[in-house]
Amino acid sequence: MDWPFISVIIPTYGREEALRDSIRDAIAQDYPNFEILVVDQKPNHNEEVQLYLDQVAGAGEIKLFTLDWASLPGARNYAVRRAKGDIMLFLDDDVVLESSFLKTHAQVFLDKPEVGAVAGRVLDRMKLADAKREDAAQAKTAATEGCCGNESTSGRVIEDLPPEAMDPGIAWYHMDLVHTVKPQRVLTARGCNMSFRREIFYKHGVFFDERFGGSAIREESDFCLRIRKTGYQIWYAPAAELVHLGEESGGCHDVSTKSLKYQLTFYHNHFLMGLKNLSLGQNLRFFAKLFDCHVLGHAPCNKSPSLKKTLVRGAFYSLGFFKAAATQVKSIWDHGQVNSRQDPLFGK
């Protein structure tokens, strides 16, 4: 079989052993035709990890790039401009892969020419742990009330995603790429496990928007919404699964979720995605759901209902909207390639 050449792209920031192990899994793939590009945005590692990076780079097993700035979408764009692959496959720096992982991504592109992007299944360690705790709480309640109990959440299986998962106004609260086991069209991918045809970037000119700062939440959703305009489909392939460790430190942002910067950027990124890509009606529903879930704390966010915390979240919600509106106005002259402009390959 004539397998497509795959460029495996791993942006990283301040990660140590998890990065090393992720690279090892990528190198060990049972696939005949691929390269690995590691974009290191904080190239100061402990001695053991640095020795490993130098060894595998020196042996030509990876291409190692070091940058003096940090931006997840910027690092993705930087790697794309240096990648040779027919397929661009993006991983986080804290994942666990089976040796057949690349083949499962490639097979979808071979079988489905109408597909321009593949969203792999993400067995998120933190979300699965939360589900197990929810199961335990349900079992305890059932035992106390003398009831038969509820269906297990950690063991639940989803065949078809609900129709709401294809509605850009509310899809983000109905798309479960952890428990879904059936291949199907989807609206977006998870940034730690997604792949795209090369022409998405070079024929259609769709690159990642570097104005999605901090943890860059919603940058992949923004990217995938723009892919829809090319006519390509996004296909969910549960066989292309990985385990996402969700390390608490390091990564491509290393910003505490409790920090003021994170909170402001979180809302800014959500509003920016909406303002860029959604209709007025879709935005009204999206902003309403964002408020209901993340400010009022209703399900599935389940945040603290205390008045003080609700008011604080509401303040960041408002500030995030105005910041995103200002960013969108600046789009008239600034399309978001802030870090890429420092790259000598930018525009080539």
Image (cartoon, grey):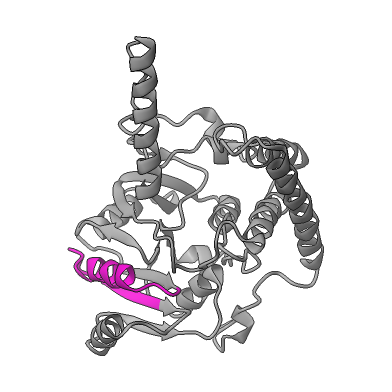
Can residue 121 be seen here? The reply is no
How many labels were placed on the picture?
0
Q: Quadrant of residue 103?
A: bottom left
Instruction: Identify the residue at image location x=77%, y=41%.
Output: 280
Q: Which residue is more in the foreground, 190 or 313?
A: 313
Say left or right for 348 vs 182: right
- Judge whether 200 appears above or below 66 on screen: above
Q: Position of residue 27 (x, y in %)?
A: 23, 71
Q: Position of residue 11 (x, y in %)?
A: 43, 71
Query: Is residue 25 within the magenta segment?
Result: yes
The structure residue drawn at horizontal position 35% and vertical position 23%, both measured from the top left corner, is 140
Farthest front residue? 144
Q: Where in the figure is residue 126, as x and y percent of width and height?
A: 39, 48
Query: Is 307 placed above or below 60 here?
Result: above
Q: Is residue 228 visible?
A: yes
Q: Which residues are magenta?
A: 13-38
Locate residue 14, reporting x and y percent: 43, 75
The answer to which quarter of the image holds residue 269 is bottom right
> Looking at the rendering, in which quadrant would you find the C terminus?
bottom right
- Determine if the magenta segment contains residue 27: yes
In the rendered image, the vertical position of residue 67 relative to residue 237, given as above or below: below
What residue do we see at 33% from left, 50% from top? 108
